[in-house]
Image (cartoon, helix red, strand yellow):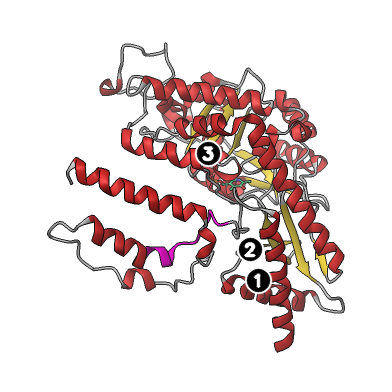
Amino acid sequence: MENAEFRKQAHLIVDWIADYLADPSIYPVKSKAKPGEIISNLPDFPPEIEESMDQIFEDFNKLIIPGITHWQSPNFYAYFPANSSYPSVLAEMLTAALGTQCMKWETSPAAAELEECVVNWMKKMTGIPENFHGVIQDSASSATLVAILSAREKSSHFSINDQGFNSQNFRVYCSSEAHSSVEKAVKIAGIGKNNLVKIPVDNEFRLLPEKLIEAIETDLKNNLKPLCVIAALGTTSSTAIDPLKSIASICERYKIWLHVDAAYAGSALILPEYRWMIEGIEQIDSIVFNPHKWLFTNFDCSLYFVKDLPALLNTFSILPEYLRTSNQGKVNDYCDWGIPLGRRFRALKLWFVIRNFGTSGLQKKIRHHIKLANEFMSWILEDGRFEIMAPLTLNLICFRYNPGNMSEEKLNELNENLLFRINIKGKIYLSHTKLNGKYTLRIVIGQTSVEKKHIEKSWRNILECLAEYENIQ
Ligand SMILES: *Cc1c(COP(=O)(O)O)cnc(C)c1O
């Protein structure tokens, strides 16, 4: 492709993007593609000769878009959002154009120093103390793995990195509601899934500190070594907030690494009225949260903050001759702050977002989402036929249809069918979880462009699906 052609195509694509983001709700929010349907329309062999952008782009519209689930649609309420915004998309265009590989300071000094700047800004915005060191990772899963590996190395005096495992009998603790990434990290870190202790929760799905103490005491009696606790600020099923202060003092007493998984809820820390969630933060060792979930910075962008920087660097830094630079030790070489060597320039989009919204603009949006969620919950309660399954802590409402006089089994079946009906229509997209074995519908109101008119329509849609379902019963 020649530069003139690139310019022409880039303008066309920008126009497409602007149209798309103006109203992604013209598409069915959840793709209706069947397994294998998309690939069956793609050629088995790559093209031998060049194809024009016009052809390629036509196929993008014809073959790819039908298999896309529209995460930027205001009708997307499933999982947790991976929301985005105009400044973020603009920055990603520049990131792609620069195509820098930001492994070391020298490979793009501005990328490293902008990263340092934005993670420091984020500390001020969220109340994470100044003595923490921040870095951008690809995902919360990686960040939690980084935390567990750092804890493992610090605890073993950095010997496992050198010699491998030698029956250290490590134990890791999290609540029974913690995210699956904890189990994955424990497996990868060589600790073993059987050494992940799931601590029971209270009736609001928060870790019970006294049960944590019990588990630690039992393990100590059995000559097992408590290594790390992962506290959840905002569980994935119901955004339950573990009691950080109590957990932190337990970890301090037993000298256990405390990592905080605030992947979703961390964005709400920019609101002073939610800072209570991190009471006790001075005593923790590390925390992760994802601006790519609820801070309008498109996937991927995950912030990891750690107190003991030497422990992090001693765990991950590795220096073959071909990576040696003259600035060694004087600058931040972020490849030593995590798992991959190669790193995207993720700081740019966060910088664009923070500047273009301003802190107050970001706060306004998050508060707006929380307000909409409270309104939505009030409609569910007013209706009388539904049950709220977990406290509303932020903007995730857990609910189910429960007209009374039905067995739990029947209720599970009914709500599963109801969700299927809602999603197959393609007007809105919700997801589910199980809380205490009960099938629960989850609606998260956190899309960048979601407004009251969208949630009103969504509520009507849910009621219509319910009426249809009851009619055929
Ligand atoms: C989404 C989520 C994760 C995983 O995040 P990734 O960035 O996709 O790895 C971990 N923990 C919690 C609580 C989450 O909600």
Residue 419, which numbered label? 1
10 Å crowding of disc 2: few (<14), some (14-19), many (20+): some
- Label 2: state its secondary structure: loop
**Does residue 430 appear left or right of residue 327 in this picture?**
right
- Answer with mark 3 or mark 2, whichever residue precedes in sequence: 3
Q: Disc 2 designates what residue?
A: 430
Q: Disc 3 designates what residue?
A: 145
Task: Using the rendered image of the protein, determine whether residue 17 is visible from the camera's viewpoint.
Answer: yes
Residue 161 occupies which quadrant of the picture?
top left
Could you tell me residue 314's position as x and y percent? 47, 22
> Relative to 374, does residue 350 appear above or below in the rendering?
above
For image coordinates 73% across by 87% down, the residue present is: 471
10 Å crowding of disc 3: few (<14), some (14-19), many (20+): many
**Does residue 105 appear left or right of residue 407 in this picture?**
left
Identity of the amino acid at label 3?
Leu
| Farthest residue, direction bottom | 472
Q: Are marks 2 and 1 in contact (CB under 8 Å)?
A: yes
